[in-house]
């Protein structure tokens, strides 16, 4: 009997398919430590900016990149932005500050990092912005907070989106306590607010808003539930505009028997193939409803649309 010849990549794809896994080149899930990952492709390289630091004493952001390869290797960069060099952060007199939930927008060859400074109490949370000439930084802070929270709004989880139909750039933010979504139009320099826009908060919104467009339809996706419990999940709504009104479409990523609390995600489109991926975090090897302890992990899985352009339920892969 003559056996067929397979390349290493083809054999890997067959093995993964046989066990129900999606053959992605980034390695088996989880791929990285961390939470709140914002992913984007720069050329053929996938970059991920998570909530993660190399020391509990350092509040900073790092980036991770993966170039196309048969090997699932990730390169760490940074810190790309360190709170120690930003004077306005400690100026509020709060006893502690945390670096949370970064997102990056690429515009005219420059990189804009939007990030959260928590916690909300005893002082209001804030959102900052920093700019770099390269995805690995160093990012230079703008010198002042972009948005400051108040008693009814927690300024966290920023996500910038440029509408391909108009060229305008919007910043989506907010959540957790109060679970309120707010949207702002940015000035042309992308480091200042032009004004706030009136939008409704979609059903079951908690935090972690993400906006993308596909075939003329706008998809607002977000996390619902408690970040330490199995209720944490990804839901979404659609609209004919980046401002709504929203048509709620339901949950697309939820906990299973041992992989819990998947959420705070981003969607990225693979160059060349045009296929979509979801980059998110989850708790590994957990049972029950929580609260879970330890560290969250970054994972990558496939996302697909049905014949009506709605997002199919996403299947988690990995151990």
Image (cartoon, rainbow, N blue to C red):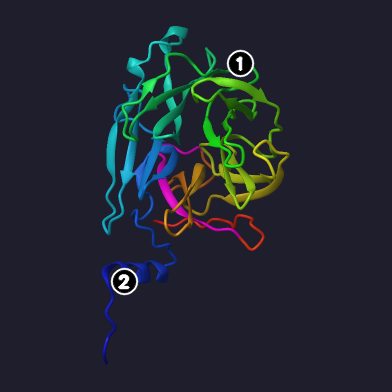
What range of the chain is rendered magenta?
291-305
Precedes in sequence: disc 1 or disc 2: 2
Residue 142 coordinates in the image, percent (x, y): 43, 18
Q: Quadrant of the N terminus?
A: bottom left
| Figure check: 105 above or below 128 | below
Place of residue 266 in the rendered image (x, y in percent of width and height, measured from the top left): 49, 43
Q: Is residue 208 left or right of residue 195?
A: left
Residue 309 inside the magenta-drawn segment: no
Residue at image point 34% right, 57% down: 25
User: Disc number at residue 226?
Assistant: none
Question: Is 292 in the magenta?
Answer: yes
- Residue 35: image quadrant is top left
Quickly name the residue at label 1.
150
The kind of secondary structure element at disc 2 is helix
Judged from this view, the residue extending furthest toward the bottom is 1
Q: Quadrant of residue 32?
A: top left
In this orientation, does residue 193 appear?
yes
In-front residue for pair 235/109: 109
Q: At 52% across and 43% down in the image, what residue appears?
A: 263
CA gap between label 1 and label 2 equals 55 Å
Can you give x and y, in whole percent of width and height, for residue 69 in the image? 28, 56
Tell me the quarter of the picture where residue 98 sits: top left
Image x and y of residue 230, in percent: 54, 44
Residue placed most toward the observer, 275 or 152: 275
Judge the density around disc 1: few (<14), some (14-19), many (≥20) Cα neighbours within 10 Å: some
Of residues 116 and 142, the one drawn nearer to the viewer in this rendering? 142
The residue located at (61%, 16%) in the rendering is 150
Q: Is residue 118 above or below residue 22?
A: above
Residue to which mark 2 is pinned: 11
């Amino acid at each position: 009997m003559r056996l067929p010849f397979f390349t290493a990549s083809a054999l890997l794809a067959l093995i993964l398919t046989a066990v129900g896994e999606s053959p992605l080149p980034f390695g088996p899930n989880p791929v990285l430590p961390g939470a709140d990952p914002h992913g984007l492709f720069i050329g053929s390289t996938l970059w991920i900016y998570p909530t993660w630091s190399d020391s509990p004493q350092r509040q900073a952001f790092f980036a991770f990149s993966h170039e196309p390869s048969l090997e699932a290797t990730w390169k760490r960069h940074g810190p790309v932005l360190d709170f120690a060099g930003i004077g306005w952060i400690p100026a509020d007199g709060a006893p502690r500050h945390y670096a949370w939930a970064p997102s990056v927008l690429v515009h005219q060859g420059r990189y804009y990092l939007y990030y959260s400074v928590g916690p909300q109490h005893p002082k209001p949370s804030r959102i900052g912005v920093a700019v770099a000439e390269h995805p690995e930084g160093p990012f230079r802070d703008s010198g002042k907070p972009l948005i400051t929270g108040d008693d009814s709004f927690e300024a966290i989880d920023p996500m910038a989106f440029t509408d391909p139909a108009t060229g305008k750039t919007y910043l989506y933010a907010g959540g957790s306590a109060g679970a309120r979504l707010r949207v702002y139009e940015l000035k042309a320099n992308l480091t200042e607010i032009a004004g706030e826009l009136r939008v409704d908060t979609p059903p079951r919104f908690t935090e972690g808003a993400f906006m993308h467009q596909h075939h003329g339809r706008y998809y607002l996706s977000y996390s619902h539930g408690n970040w330490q419990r199995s209720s944490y999940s990804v839901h979404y709504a659609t609209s004919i505009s980046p401002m709504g009104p929203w048509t709620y479409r339901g949950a697309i990523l939820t906990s299973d028997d041992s992989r819990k609390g998947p959420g705070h995600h981003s969607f990225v489109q693979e160059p060349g193939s045009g296929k979509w991926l979801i980059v998110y975090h989850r708790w590994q090897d957990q049972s029950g409803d929580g609260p879970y302890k330890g560290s969250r992990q970054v994972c990558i899985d496939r996302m697909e649309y049905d014949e009506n352009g709605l997002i199919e339920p996403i299947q988690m892969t990995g151990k």
